[in-house]
Amino acid sequence: MLLTALIGLASSGVSGLFSLAGVYVLVVGVVALVRGRVRWALLRNRAMSGIAIAGAIVGLVVGGATAKNPSTTPVAGHSPSSTIKTTAGASLSATPTAAASTTPPTTPTAKSNSSALSSSSTHSSSSTAAQNPAKAIVGSNPAAHAALATLATLQVKGRAPQTGYDRAQFGQAWTDDVTVADGHNGCDTRNDILGRDLAATSFKAGTNNCAVTSGTLHDLYTGRTISFIRGDSTSTAVQIDHIVSLSDAWQTGAQQLSAEQRQNFANDPRELLAVDGPTNEAKGDGDAATWLPPNKSFRCTYVADQVMVKSAYRLWVTSAEKAAMTAVLTHCSNPPAATPSPSSTHTPSPSTTYTSPLPLVPTTTAPQPADVYYANCAAARAAGAAPLYRGQPGYRSGLDRDDDGVACE
């Protein structure tokens, strides 16, 4: 009996001790009851045998009551609410959720039903964020989600040489002779943008509300408020920035645009923004990989605008630029719209709202001498002609190794 009890204790603890000891005593008690006595067990008559059997039953009951349910016994080192890490890095909670409860819900009143819907929506959002935080953030920002989808359609290529770049390649600065929004409206592009982006504007008499003489800029790049006064020494306080710099555009596909298209690009209201002058100068010709607005809350909108402009004019992005854009758009959350602050009474022109990209890539390239010949791609790049498209002067199959119609890409 002692050996049996020890085995039970070692295997199942106290419950095992009571259970096996009870079984042992029950068997001996039954034998003594049948035979009349078992001397070595001190059961000298049937009355004592009955007492032994009753004690054995008590032992079995106690052993069963103290036994733990194996399905709820925690594994060593893990509590029931421990978190399990999957190979993909997602966290799966072992704690039963409210959705798994079998308790029937009470019938809500109209007021409690509204609360229940709100709670359900909140829970759904938090669950999505826990499974994929980046996806949840983008999902809550349709503009960022759309920009990410558009970014995925842009070509990824290295920068073309800056050879041949000059501001004059994009036409006369701030000309009104363009076919984009606000073109041929009798007002130059700079004043169009100042009139759009500044609040409390005043205009020079006799200019048909064109020449802006003063106003207030709620600068999106810095978050500061800047007073603008027209003058030789004061106008530069507010400058018009090309969201995609002209130099960057030249090196990522604008060389292939016609002169008219480049002039449209440089004066397209969707590509322009009135900003703090010194900040614009600090940006230079940087792309998203090298420069972002100091005002972090505007970065998502800024990058989304760059993506849409590049898509509209069929420009490409570098791998570093795409990585930077993806990082901003993936992690941004509820960026402000590209408009002045609520305190401003000025309403931006609808032209700042993006629609579907314009098919601006020319079907034919600008005329070039028919006898153009490049010994190799290095020579084509040095001349600022790369990439070369099939049918374009200088293109030949020897430079197009993958025969996709684009040489020296």
Image (tube, helix red, strand yellow):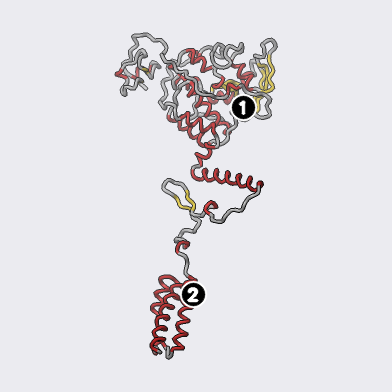
Asked where in the image residue 49 lies, by quadrant, the reply is bottom left
- 50 lies above or below 361: below
Figure check: 213 above or below 56: above
Residue 189 at x, y percent in the picture: 58, 15
Element type at mark 2: helix
Q: Is residue 272 visible?
A: yes
Tell whether 52 sits left or right of 219.
left
Q: CA distance from mark 2 to mark 1?
A: 76 Å
* Quadrant housing residue 256: top left
SS class, disc 1: loop
Which quarter shows the C terminus?
top left
Query: Which quadrant holds the N terminus?
Result: bottom left
Q: Going by the image, does 386 lie left or right of 218?
A: left
Q: Nearer the viewer, residue 377 or 310?
A: 310
Residue at the spot of label 2: 62
Going by the numbered disc 2, the residue's amino acid type is Val
Q: Which residue is mark 1?
A: 339
- Above-or-below relation of 257 to 295: above
> Contact (CB < 8 A) between labels 2 and 1?
no
- The location of residue 328, given as percent across then percent down, is 51, 34
